[in-house]
Amino acid sequence: MLQAVIMAGGIGSRLRPLTCDLPKPMARLCGRPNIEYILELLKEHNVTNAAVTVQYLPQRISERFDNVYCGINLTFVEETEPLGTAGSVKNASKYFAQPDNEETKKQKFLKFSDKSESESACCIVISGDAMCDFDLTAAYKRHCKSGAAATIIVKAVEDPREYGLVDVDESGNVRAFVEKPCFSQAVSNLANTGIYILSQQALTLIPSHQQYDFAKDLFPKLLSNGLRIATYEDKGYWCDIGDIESYRRCQQDMLMGKVRCRIVGVQDANGNIFKDSRPRGTYTIEPPVYIGSGVEIGEGAVINGMSVIDDGSIVGAGARVSGSVLLPDSYTGKGSTLSGAVICAGASAQQQAMLFENAVLGAGAVAGANSVIRQGVRVWANKHVEAGVTLRDNLQYGAGKNLCFEDNGLCGETGVELTPELAVRLGLALGSSIKEGRVGVGCTTDRAARVLTQALISGVLSAGCDALDFGAGFEAMFRFNLAFCGLKLGVFISGGETASLRLFTAGGLPATRAQERAIEGALQRGEYKRCNSSGFGEVSNLTGMRVLYENELIKYAPRGLFELGVAVKCANKDIETMLRQTLYRLGAHHDDAFTLQISPDGDTVSITHAGSGYLSHNKALAICCVTEFEQGCDVALPFDAPRIMDELAIRHGAEVKRYLSCPADNSDSNARELACVQLWSRDALMLSIKLLDYLINEGMTPIQLFTMLPEFDTASVMIKTGKNPAGILRELAKNGNRVEEQGIGEGVVLRDDRGVILVRPLKRGGGVKLVAEAFNSETAMELCESYEKLIKPFISY
């Protein structure tokens, strides 16, 4: 009576996401779990009792079987703590001692602490997650004849570097072991298959209830004690299903008849195997394939050879499946292409989706219509790849979506969505998108931003483009650096938990849509410029530009700010320190009564004064615009700047030229040209000093400064609208009092008795931003609320 221990505790980490919700021995091969083939092999060689060691998701194995399977009595032994390979076998083997114990027979699960240790006969140890058809009877006879303490079944392999190797003498006894060597140390091509026959003598040497391995502990101990370890070289089939490629290859070998095993179903004259009757319909099958029960195949679909279509799977019309594995209840949509892919249970590849070699769609995951999942990319269980997305990285966290520039640039969770690997590809796309010139790069001061920046620079250089590294700082200073150096393309990276990558063009202005599309397209297609050894770009360290920026700030108050008391507050201590020191250089002194509050990126400023109240950024900007209008100068402002600026300009015979945040054409070229030389309108530090200079030179008091403008205030809200807000804007433009402006702007501007409101779509769609402008903040908010109610009937989610 032969006894066996089946090691079935494997996690199968290299097979994930296939093994995210099932243990490795339960991975299906041509319609059945791998462990069933192993049990049938044991039955063929007269094994009558088997202990199955389980640890990872043990119920998934035990619930599949009764206490007896194909005539083998099964006992499931759960490890509640890691025991190692040999320790696990020792723990399981003791249950062979009392086959007549009725209580033991009734227990489906046994913990290692449930019984006291007892003696047991020699046993076969075999893995439940490797496929083989070895002659176990012949191996057992070899073991008995040799009188060895243990026998290892070995297999000659083509590439010995991937296996633990066994060096044997002329009698086939083990001399030494070497684990996954390079060729220089591969003195043998005999791989240790992990299938052993252990005598009672070997089992006794394994300590109980502690971690103990065969390769590291037991076998070296046997040899050091002078005990022999025999080998049996089998010529049969063996596949260690360690990764997705071997998982697919094993099933292809089964279909080609290379494995002596029983595939459930009926084989037709062409070598195709159908578990039930052939599915109805007009489609093409190129043999050999396996088709499970309840499978549906659409009109005109093509199932190429070496494919496995498991129970309940649906293949849509016109789909093409080649060398792929479709697990139970999976869905392959109309016109989709699967080439060497694995679609896990309940997963869906929607119409026109494409999955390439060794791509894996985890259980319940969805690959959206027209999405592309590249070679070797894995999508974890229940994740969703959006329609049209090309996925080049594993999707384990977050959502699979196309990288598109949004209002705040490319944004994502640091280390999850925005990773150094992605930053390298972004750098390649940036470097590939410009025919000549250099790319300016800067970042915030945190460690994550620095790492992402270095990765991005590597990509830029790899595309043969030079990079100017402005180092760590803040966005407003970075824009000055771009303008000063005359660069046409720059990237600023902000770190933190959510990272962002913002793209700028000449003058530090927001990039055009054409520039964004060129980079998005290169990323999506994976098409980048490649260089030879002499073609890589060079990086220049321009961190010293900080001094030039500080000198530029000084220029905004050429006569100084003597006797002015002012305080600076900013969450970004770099900005706070720089502006405070600049003000002191200009002759100002500290006074909390007059406080400048700067945003962390250096974009906006608000001012408070103990006796005068509060001045918002828009009002501070308006005052500085007035200083230009009074000199007969036009001013360039963003499209969403308050419309009162236009009224102030008209009063002085000047004009406000508005530029877009992401122009699709060059319709705002005049405004952009002017904005390139008016950095103060986009830089809170420059704006602050310009405002203070005006206060001093005009001999004004703070209260006079705060009250020099007509009363106005702004408010804004965001509204989700569904995918396409364009229809909403069209309805509003038809039914509202639209303010006519030259060209096509970003959104529509409407006016009523309470004020003006800009309805501006988000760059990526799916929502609009309402920016209201009225006599005071309360009225502006009322205006937002009323238009929000007006918009809601048009919203379709």
Image (cartoon, helix red, strand yellow):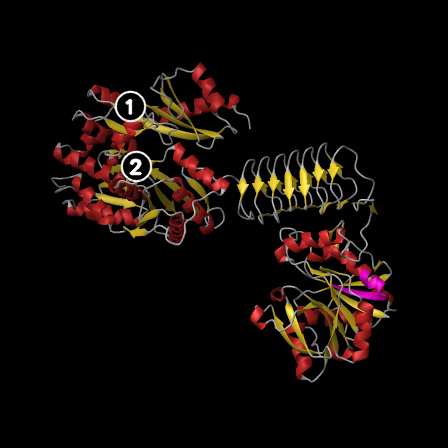
Q: Which residue is mark 1?
A: 644
Between 759 and 403, the residue placed more toward the observer is 403
Write the residue at 69% across / 56% down. 23
Q: In the rendered view of the protein, which quadrant contains the N terminus? A: bottom right
Q: Cβ–Cβ below 8 Å for labels 2 and 1?
A: no
Give the class, few, some or many, for how many residues have Cα within 10 Å of label 2's Cα (few <14, many ≥20).
Answer: many
Q: Please, is residue 762 above or below residue 581 in the view? A: above
x%, y% of residue 29?
73, 52
Disc 2 is placed on an element classified as: helix
- Is 51 in the magenta? yes
**In the rendered structure, which amino acid carries the disc numbered 1?**
Ile
Q: In the rendered view of the protein, which quadrant contains the C terminus? A: top right
- Is 690 in the magenta? no
Tell me if I can see residue 121 in this picture.
Answer: no
Q: Is residue 226 left or right of residue 663?
A: right
Picture quadrant where residue 262 is located: bottom right
Write the residue at 78% across / 57% down. 37
x%, y% of residue 549?
23, 45
Picture quadrant where residue 208 is located: bottom right
Between 598 and 544, the residue placed more toward the observer is 544
Q: Which residue is mark 2?
A: 506
Q: Is residue 744 left or right of residue 130?
A: left
Q: Please, is residue 517 above or below residue 66 in the view? A: above
Q: Earlier in the sequence, mark 2 or mark 1?
A: 2
Magenta residue span: 41-53
